[in-house]
Image: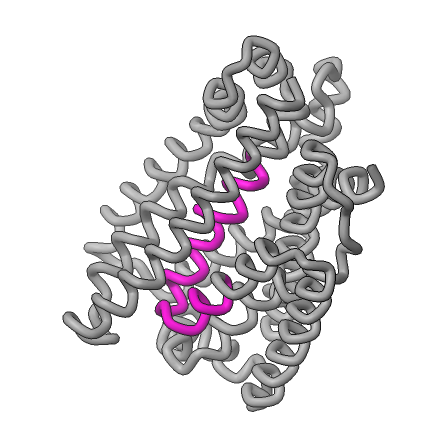
Amino acid sequence: MSETKLRLFSRVRTLSSAVIAIATVLSLLFSQWLGTNSLGWQLVLATIALAIGIPHGALDHLVTLPKAAPIRMVLFIILYVAIALLAIYAILRWNVWGFIFVVIMSATHFGIGDAAFLSEKDSLDGSSRIPAWFYAPAAGLLPVAIPLINSRSTDALEKVNPALINWHSGFTTEILIAVAVVTTLCLLALLQRKRYRDALDLLLLAALASFAPPLVAFAVYFGCWHAMRHTARLTSLLPNSESAYLRGRPGQAFAAAVIPGLPALVGTLIFVVILAGFSQQDLSDKFLWLTLVTIWALTVPHMIVTARLDRAALKK
């Protein structure tokens, strides 16, 4: 079963890396042909990528309480929603600081999650593992911080909430330098350990964040890198995936970790259709802001649940 699982992890890693490289090249080509202000192709790429990534976050209850009684499951959901409501209040009460909190937490979540993926893969193929801090800081900061200090993100933040435009207090150069220093140190540490494939990962993330528009950069990273690798890790925790591994079918194991999250994708698509219908009338920027706040807030309990899994993976 370990060999089958290793095949899946290797395929997911190769596919996610290839998609990032393709998205970077397409962004350069489309920006050259259609102009950097053209939104059509950006929305298409972002929508596809987000659709791929949405299901991975809808399995928290199955992963945390796989065999829970109904009462325990209800209590878990109530606590989950309560944490999200507290996050909504914090972001609405303190717009900028709430946004900064989400940014820091997202970078931490993404970096540690990616490092945990590599740790599990190393355990499967018998490789010597590297300390998480060799990889996680750069892997988290590159896809989050760089797009947000990109000048093209200003227009998007202005539509969402003008108070967020100057969330960085003008320290864009300092943030860029800090991320560059962290990334360089991580690359040197990886190269010193001859972890050339891990170093290539960081270079791919840096290229996507630097050359793709902010919307495309984050959406493609979220859906085609973070979500795919996280889903691969979930296969170790779901009975249907374990059964597929025993039959030597890594593709079915991955599908078994995707299918339970498809209702979340369908629900999101329905919501988007309804939202598009209202947009012909009086869909205000305020409503868009509240919608994004809700989405950000729901990531807080998801990250808390995932942190427990990440910690277990890194301690194996």
- Give the residue furthest to the right: 315
Image position of 117 (left or right of 144)? right
Q: Is residue 174 above or below residue 92?
A: below
Asked if residue 305 can be seen in this view, the reply is no
Q: Residue at x 48, y 51 (%)?
A: 222
Residue 309 image-quadrant placement: top right
Locate residue 121, reporting x and y percent.
Answer: 66, 38
Locate residue 256, reporting x and y percent.
Answer: 51, 20
Image position of 192 (left or right of 274)? right
User: Could you say which is closer to the camera, residue 2 or residue 136?
Assistant: 2
Residue 120 image-quadrant placement: top right
Q: Which residues are magenta?
A: 205-231
Is residue 5 rendered magenta in the image? no
User: Could you say which is closer to the camera, residue 166 or residue 137?
Assistant: 137
Q: Residue at x 62, y 23 (%)?
A: 3
Q: Residue at x 58, y 18 (%)?
A: 241
Image position of 263 (left or right of 35)? right
Is residue 214 rendered magenta in the image? yes
User: Could you say which is closer to the camera, residue 114 or residue 99?
Assistant: 114
Q: Where does the C terminus fall, quadrant-wise? A: top right
Q: Is residue 301 above or below residue 243?
A: below
User: Could you say which is closer to the camera, residue 55 or residue 309?
Assistant: 309
Asked if residue 81 can be seen in this view, the reply is yes
For the stretch drawn in magenta, what is the main secondary structure? helix
Locate residue 279, reporting x and y percent.
Answer: 25, 55
Residue 229 image-quadrant placement: top right
Q: Where does the N terminus fall, quadrant-wise? A: top right
Locate residue 18, reporting x and y percent.
Answer: 40, 49
